[in-house]
Image (cartoon, rainbow, N blue to C red):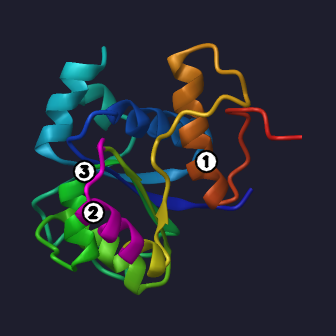
Amino acid sequence: MIYLKLIIGITGSTGVIYGIRLLEILKKLEIETYLIMTKWALKCVLLETNYDAKYVQSLSRIFNNNNLAASISSGTHKVNGMIVAPCTMKTMASIANGYDDTLISRAATVTMKESRKLILMPREAPLTAIHLENMLKLSRLGVVIIPPMMEFYTKPKSISDIIDHGIGKCLDQFNIEHNLYDKWN
């Protein structure tokens, strides 16, 4: 098994379950993670799930989103990449424009400048032209954009199946083996 270290950002958009499930899977796979959560993500955890902040934070090493001096804000802190799940349009705009006002946006910028894989799971609907332009700009810079979209070829039977498919798509980007959904044959 290849030893991986990943930064996980969870922002305050609907869909925080994607970030939580991602952390659960990575912990089970013994992949080291560094978690950054926005204050609104913490509120969404309580609004959208049966979990609390203490549980989510127990899944990873925690960093305060306001601490721009954290080790993960530097390229000298070696990680394999970063996933922001879910990613608000505000955070995406910050990353797309190099406005490193939070640890999540700073860590994402560092991930890009060090040529490491950055995955964003944007959550918003409908999308404006500004949202699409920011996604296109980031995609052209090598950022992988994986909106948590439903698929039906795996015949999902539950919301958990749909969430696992989105998380599996992120894991695929790092060549992390999983059985979260059946692959297309």
Mark 2 or mark 1, earlier in chain = 2
In the rendering, at what x and y percent does residue 115 appear? 49, 83
In the rendering, at what x and y percent does residue 159 appear? 51, 19
* Marks 2/1: CA–CA distance: 25 Å
Q: Residue at x 24, y 65 (%)?
A: 130
Q: Nearer the viewer, residue 89 or 26?
A: 89
- Which span of residues is magenta-colored? 124-137
Note whether 24 is above or below 128 in the view shown: above
Quadrant occupied by the C terminus: top right
Q: Amino acid at mark 2?
A: Ala
Label 3 environment density (alpha carbons within 10 Å; few <14, some 14–19, many ≥20): many
Q: Residue at x 19, y 20 (%)?
A: 47
User: In the shown orientation, is residue 66 left or right of residue 87?
Assistant: left
Q: Nearer the viewer, residue 182 or 1?
A: 182
Q: Which residue is mark 1?
A: 169
Q: Amino acid at mark 3?
A: Thr
Instruction: Find numbered disc 3 in the image and state the secondary structure of the residue it sits on.
Output: loop
Note whether 151 is above or below 37 in the view shown: above
Which of the 4 image quarters holds residue 7? bottom left
Q: Nearer the viewer, residue 70 or 184?
A: 184
Which of the 4 image quarters holds residue 129? bottom left
